[in-house]
């Protein structure tokens, strides 16, 4: 059964381009993972907010994703680049 995530990241204004570069790398790397079905990055127009829409094949695939070096690197740097990160695990209803 698929796992769906929505991640909302609020960038520090002065770090927006640096954050964007890291997030685009995460998209590139994540899409290579076997369990990745969808990994889309969106940006809220005129705001410092990025939104990921993710779909993973199963919980074990998501667990493996969360252990990837590029993701751990992002987590280590995220407090310097963001003011808030909210991750929602969702259920598809339609």
Image: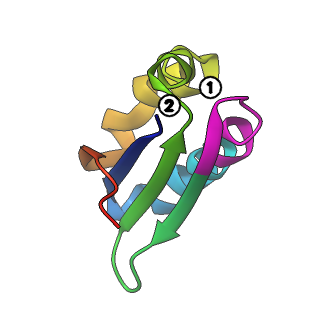
Q: In this view, does 17 lie to the left or right of 92?
A: right
**CB of mark 1 within 8 Å of CB of mark 2?**
yes
Magenta run includes residue 31: yes
- Towards the viewer: 3 or 15: 3
The secondary structure type at the circle numbered 2 is helix
Q: In this view, does 66 lie to the left or right of 87?
A: right
- Identity of the residue drawn at 71% across and 30% down: 33
User: Residue 15 is drawn in which quadrant?
Assistant: bottom left
Disc ID at residue 74: 2
Q: Tell me the CA gap for discs 1 and 2.
A: 6 Å
Give, as a single range, the part of the protein colored magenta: 27-38
Residue 33 to residue 17: above or below: above
- Graded by Cα atoms within 10 Å as few (under 14), some (14 to 19) or many (20 or more), the crowding at tag 1 reads some
Q: Mark 1 points at which residue?
A: 70
- Identity of the residue drawn at 53% across and 13% down: 67
Look at the image and tell me in which quarter the C terminus lies. bottom left
Magenta run includes residue 33: yes
């Amino acid at each position: 059964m698929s796992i769906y995530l929505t991640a909302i990241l609020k960038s520090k204004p002065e770090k927006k381009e640096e954050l964007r570069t890291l997030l685009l790398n995460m998209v590139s790397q994540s899409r290579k993972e076997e369990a990745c079905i969808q990994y889309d990055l969106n940006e809220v127009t005129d705001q410092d907010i990025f939104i990921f829409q993710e779909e993973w094949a199963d919980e074990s695939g998501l667990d493996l994703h969360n252990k990837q070096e590029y993701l751990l690197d992002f987590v280590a740097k995220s407090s310097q680049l963001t003011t808030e990160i909210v991750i929602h695990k969702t259920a598809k209803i339609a």
